[in-house]
Amino acid sequence: MDSSEFFRTEKDTSPWGTSETTRLYVELLDQIAAAPSSTWSDLELAKALTELTHDEYQKYGTNGSDLDNTEARKLLTTLKAVLARVGMRNFEFAFRDFDSFRSYWIRKGASGAGGWQARRDLLADLFNPIHDRLEALVTGGSGPKVTEEALSALADPGAIRDHLDRIERSVDDDPRLAVGSAKELVESTAKLVLKRSGVEYGKSDDLPSLVAKAHTALGINAKQVEDSAENAVGIRTLLGAVSRIGVGMAELRNQVGTGHGQAEVPTWVTPRHARLAVGSAHVWCQFVLETLEQRLS
């Protein structure tokens, strides 16, 4: 998406001829702030909006912007709404429109002769981390990935990809959400494995039960390892540890995830804990899907 799409050109016909006026597409911004677009992804919108907002505030702080104060506020409000939808809730701005931006740069000593560069620097400090984070999300970042070969065992791996995308967007900015998404990743994977294996499951099956059934269906339950198997003890130990991931994920999600109302907010949960949960979920999903693919090939 190009930032120019946030503007629209209107023709004005008069007895003296036809003229064109370009204005900010406020109606589109209202739609985007209220709900995801059917035309562009939230990530595309966030990237284009960040570039546009940075550019317009920089123009105002240097040569002047064509936007008025109300439009500047609308840009920033919409940007915050879209950033929140891609998991970037922790970015705060010290101003809300052009007027408050002017007050901000005066407080920061960026007025007077030569102040234009200082104002550019102030904006760069605020916007560059957002640009960098969005670029990381666009290029795939460093989040967990399940190999395409493993995913090929599923008729429709869309649910797995969706969970992985949400996890990557939330680990740093909303670790509690990442924990909940990691649990959902394991649950969805277990159900897809059971469905692909022709094994039924019901609403009464909790996460540990689904994981256990998936292991049995794939022949990777620790109890299924024959005594005659090479390194049987070591294999049983590892399979037992992997099977307990489901139990741990369920317990952690119930304690700190966003899926249950909490009497108190568990403030101790950090990205470090989220990465532990996400890493465990990723290891399990990759292993069982690779096993499924191998059994089907």
Image (cartoon, helix red, strand yellow):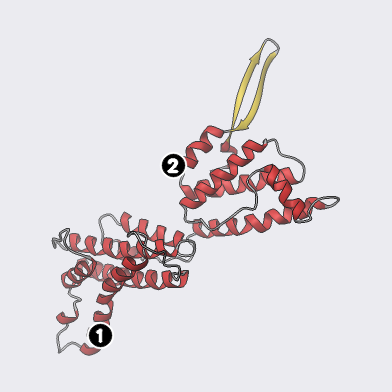
Q: CA distance from mark 1 to mark 2?
A: 48 Å
Q: State the image coordinates of residue 16 (x, y, percent, origin top left).
A: 71, 12
Amino acid at pointer 1: Thr
| Residue at the spot of label 2 | 35
Mark 1 or mark 2, whichever is nearer to me: 2
Q: Residue furthest right?
A: 113
Q: Is residue 123 left or right of residue 25?
A: right
Query: Is residue 175 or residue 54 the one in the foreground?
Result: 175
Assess disc 1: are there few (<14), some (14-19) or many (≥20) residues with their C-alpha within 10 Å of its C-alpha. Answer: few
Q: Residue at x 51, y 35 (%)?
A: 28
Quarter of the C terminus within the rendering: bottom left
Who is closer to the viewer here, 153 or 203? 203
List x then y, in percent, for residue 18: 66, 17
Residue type, label 2 = Ala
Judging by the rendered image, the residue that carries numbered circle 1 is 237
Q: Along the line of sight, which residue is nearer the eye, 46 or 75?
A: 75
Say whether residue 111 is left or right of residue 294: right
